[in-house]
Image (spheres, rainbow, N blue to C red):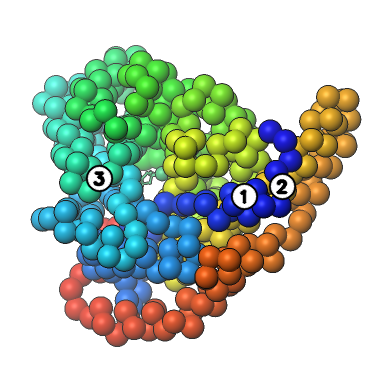
Amino acid sequence: MSTPSDADVRTALSGQTIELPSWAFGNSGTRFKVFSTPGVPRDPYEKIADAAQVNRYTGAAPRVSLHIPWDLVDDYDALAAHARELGVTIGAINSNLFQEDVYKLGSLTHADPAVRAKAVQHHKDCIDVMRATGSTDLKIWLPDGLNYPGQDDIRARQDRLAESLAEIYAALEPEHRILLEYKFFEPAFYTMDIPDWGTSLVHCLALGDQATVVLDTGHHAPGTNIEFIVAQLLRVGRLGAFDFNSRFYADDDLMVGAADPFQLFRIMNEIVAADALSASSGVNFMLDQCHNIEPKIRGQIRSVMNVQEATAKALLVDRDALAAAQRDGDVLGAHGVLMDAYNTDVRPLLAQVRESKGLDGDPVDAFLASGYPEKVADERVGGTQAGWGA
Ligand code: LRH
Ligand code: MN
């Protein structure tokens, strides 16, 4: 990868897209409290309308991922048409196996074949939704795991998981992909059945080419070098997507780049170095966040901007100088090349890229000036606000 020209940098930034999670627009919180806010969407139609606002002002968020059954509707063709009218499309379809009593001791890993069959059928139902919405990504995150040593046989659960995933894989259309997500703890506290990238990769390799790994930036043990995992998954061609967010301690699901902007830069630096920014790379850049206390649409706009800023800095890395310093063993020289890019203020460049697309240079100001938050707070009265625990 040689140093991109200024025009290349602008083209890459102009074409960057980030997928938004429908659930970021609903109420969320912790086990202590799920806060409500005036104007929060009450159904998937209103969630998509809010997501479309993010795309309208950033020009970089043309897809919305759905979560089933949180985004259950009678007519997915109508929902997809609604999205298109607003200038966005339906992205990944997320299954949900973490809110039913029957899955207390597991879902795709459960010892009872009837429970596994129910969980497999849920994914086949999600694939039906994908056929209706034109989605190609089925995202699977399993809450499955153990709380106490001896509670169940770790290896037997892996065998059952592999068997269940194979049934789901067999139901995919040729254009579909499985995005298999891992998480090192929670809701299980002794072991998760897909705790790390290695376990997800082992299952993906066993399934076939349509199975790839999702890297959620909040799902690693503290101190994990996430960009190393990014580089390795890109190297083996199995990085299917990111669930971007940030955290100070656990799976905090805070705005991406808020807690550790340097980490986000290092991650995007591996993406750019591997020429994996473009849509053809097959990497789906998604957000997976909860705006527990802050305004949700503005939080998503800020998050998209944080990814754009980290990406712009990564694109400004002088690749030729970096390669030369690395070749010469010039440790501080090489590190310095990266830090020069990281310490570059890219906000004027991004404002110009937005203006070149006919957008306002500052999406947050433009959104706030629109009066949309006040408008929906007035309109969305009555009904039940969407969200965790709704
Ligand atoms: C699990 C997870 C997963 C989603 C959920 C909303 O922690 O990251 O990606 O299903 O959050
Ligand atoms: Mn996630």
Residue at (34, 83) in percent of width and height: 375
- N-terminal of the two: label 2 or label 3? 2
Residue 127: % across, % down: 20, 37
In the image, taking residue 149 as reference, residue 234 lies left or right, namely right
Does residue 227 appear anywhere in the picture? no
- Estimate the spatial distance between the alpha carbons at disc 3 and disc 1, rounded to whole Å: 28 Å
Find disc 2 in the rendering and name its residue: 5
Find disc 1 in the rendering and name its residue: 311
- N-terminal of the two: label 1 or label 2? 2
Q: Secondary structure at mark 2?
A: loop
Depth order, front residue of 208/149: 208
Residue at (32, 39) in percent of width and height: 137
Q: Nearer the viewer, mark 2 or mark 3?
A: 2
Find disc 3 in the rendering and name its residue: 134
Residue 348: % across, % down: 69, 66
Residue at (76, 49) in percent of width and height: 341
Q: Check contact, mark 1 vs mark 2: CB within 8 A.
A: no
Q: Quadrant of the C terminus?
A: bottom left
Type of amino acid at the residue the image marks with label 1: Thr
